[in-house]
Amino acid sequence: MAFAAGVCAQPLTISTAWFKAGDSKEWSNPQIDDSAWKTLDVSRTWDSQGIPSSTKFGWYRMHFTPTKAMLEQSDLKEVIEFDLGTIDDVDEVYLNGKLIGKTGNMPGDTGAYAAMFYVPRKYTVPVNDKNIKWDADNVLAVRCYSDNAPGGMFGGNVKINVPSRIDGCTLSFSETDSTNKPSYSVSLNNTYKSPVSGTLKLEITDAETGKVISNIEKKISARDGKPAIITLPYDRSKCLRIKAQFTEAKSGKTISGNYTPKYILTPEAPAAPRFNTAPVYGVRPGSPIHFRFGVSGDRPMKITSPDLPAGLEINPENGALSGSLAKEGDYTFTVVATNDKGEASQQFTIKVGNRIALTPPMGWNSWNCWGLSVSQDKVMASAQALIDKGLADYGYAYINVDDAWEAPARNADGTIAVNEKFPDMKALGDWLHERGLKFGIYSSPGDYTCGGYLGSLDHEKQDAETYNSWGVDYLKYDWCGYVHKHVNEADKKTVASYVRPYLLMEGYLREQPRDIFYSLCQYGMEDVWKWGDFVDANSWRTTGDITDTWESMYDIGFVQQADLYPYAHPGGWNDPDMLIVGKVGWSNNLRDSRLTPDEQYTHISLWSLLAANMLIGCDLAQLDDFTINLLCNNEVNAVNQDILGKQAKRDVEDGDIQIWSRPLSDGSRAIGIFNVGTEDKTVNLKDYMGTLGLKNLKSIRDLWRQKDLPTDDTSYLVLPHGVKFIKVTE
Ligand code: GLA
């Protein structure tokens, strides 16, 4: 039979199920004969097991025997729990023919269709429910709907359990964003009705010195909907480690968890002006320039130039540079910023030629926060926050609208139309340009985008012209729907058939009288990094979509970029996808990034080393101090924006230690020492000097703390999933 069942061991684990594609309410009936159905692994999507990707509906059936012994083992005896992992996209679950749970909304249901492929599926039934057959065969039937591939159950074996009190308990941690009095909270949550009580012990350590700061012990109790919460103030400049352990009074069973509250490494910017952006900018002859000098410091500030080339203008209030230069060549001039605290100046060169994007693009994209719920108002709120919260002073300039701005049908003349969420694209473009920001948009070479909106297929020329008329500066061109039109089987085997749609659009973009950053998004197919230059792309996505977990960021950042360093250069960058810091959610429901603070330091350090596109994916209107500290460290960003444009190489892979380094234009080297494991590591740089090709150490700079480090003591504690990010001169 296609199921595995322990006799009394908890939980019961089911790794395979009977499966049938299609849909019939009858299939929830425990009596029907499913023995001729297919056998599928429940931990992998159906597409990976030979079920056609076009399958919309499918049913899984699992037979299992819950035993009285399981019931007896539980000190709670409240519910039987079904943990189904995750399901792509919507499911309904029946126990012996009776509906016990549902996540998402299928077509045909009341209300709008809602996919929920990322939500863990855990359903419970009271143990006294007459529908459960103890010590006999029961049938769990799962009806799944998948809108597009992949589909079905995934994310682990199915587990069936009669939980004990402690199983309903979790420890969770959170913190307030308040700048003046930061605090964090430890909560004991209990998902079951019966209350639990016991003792919570907290050990608080300074993670950088290893010193225990305090020990706390408290009696607490929690019931469903009423967690026990302990709130403690802390110093944000310290990296703390909180070890929490709860011991349940009746059973003596324990649960524990570790937590590091957000900590801030970036020193506060000086009140006097400071230039934070790369000193070069590439533009094609005659193209309009939209650029903003990134200068931090108190406002009001005046930004001017004594020797500005003819044809250019600076708005002294916001540092927005505009105008155009018709002739090829390098135009170098001085920019001066003054406020009541002082003055700073920078030599700046505009390189008029055939190359744009001389450093990786910095800015914002709507996808990782708003997903398909993006609107013009939301875009403008983030753009305004980019200015108000000072991010524009650090070079963040692109404001990119991702999918879901398109209307369901084109205009009568075939031009693309906007939907009601975007009342006026031209006005949006003008509004951004007045502020020295840049305007980005999204489309697909296919008939439809990934989100099911209209793509550019057969309208490429018209769309490029429309983008020009709106003042678009960046196009993300996303393969997705092109898969339906991807010529024929023989052609699909050629690289040329992957290049073709990108080359086509490139031709039309280049006909426009403005520079449009060309961002390829086709997830790295056919080694796009080898031919991105050929289609004159400015960046190319090298992987599938990122999400806000360590696993995703690790796979995309550490595993998949390791061999790509030879392909990045000024004008053409590897793009490992957008940043997953701050409040993200791919919908109207935003949450704090699930990356720990150390994982976020790793993320930004690695993306800087990789010369990656720095497109912030969170709602900037809800930016907290911690995220600002991550995004606005001028020394860290300077590595990303270094004008040599060399992507880091992984020089060392030694167990959980990875060292990535890149040469910088001033002759120094940026080095990231990463600990990808889950235990503290002490790493001595001197042990790797040979492998890194370093002969001697003249200076070492801690880039996050912006502080010089001694050259005679190069031993560093690197926290789990954390980084020591340094710049070294020889
Ligand atoms: C794909 C891309 C994402 C995003 C969505 C929009 O998944 O990889 O970055 O643009 O499409 O639908």
Image (cartoon, rainbow, N blue to C red):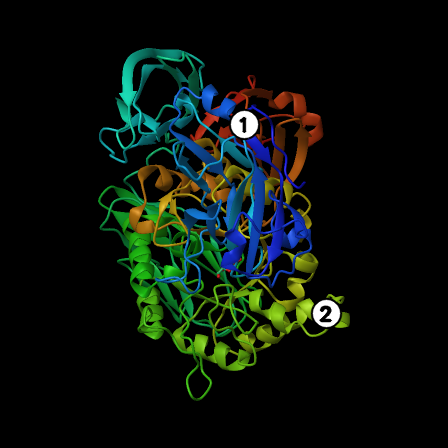
Label 2 crowd bin: few (<14), some (14–19), many (20+), radius 10 Å = few
Q: Kindly identify the amino acid type of the residue bearing the numbered disc 1.
A: Ser
Viewer-closest of 203 and 162:
162
At 42% from the left and 75% from the top, the residue drawn is 408
Q: Are marks 1 and 2 in contact (CB under 8 Å)?
A: no
Query: Disc 1, ligand 1: is the CB inside 8 Å?
Result: no
Q: Residue at x 44, y 26 (%)?
A: 163
Residue 332 position, x and y percent, is 47, 59
Disc sitting over residue 598 in the figure: none
The numbered mark at residue 496 is 2
> Which element type, helix, strand or loop, lies under badge 2?
helix
Of callouts 1 and 2, the N-terminal one: 2
Disc marking residue 699: 1
The amino acid on which the numbered mark 2 sits, given as a three-letter code, is: Ala
- Image location of residue 176, percent across then percent down: 27, 33
Q: Circle 1: is it few (<14), some (14-19), or many (20+) Cα within 10 Å?
A: some
For residue 211, say whether it is visible. yes
Q: Is residue 145 visible?
A: no
CA separation in Å, label 1 and label 2:
49 Å
Q: Nearer the viewer, residue 528 or 197?
A: 197
Q: Is residue 402 above or below residue 29?
A: below
Looking at the picture, tell me which residue is in the foreground, 153 or 150.
153
In the image, is 554 to the left or to the right of 304? right
Q: Nearer the viewer, mark 1 or mark 2?
A: 2
Residue 701, given in percent of the width and then of the height, sits at: 50, 30
* 254 shown above or below 498: above
Q: Quadrant of the N terminus?
A: top right
Tell me where residue 681 sits by quadrant.
top right
Q: Is mark 2 within 8 Å of ligand 1?
A: no
Dot 1 falls on a residue whose secondary structure is: strand
Specify the quadrant of the image occupied by residue 399.
Answer: bottom left
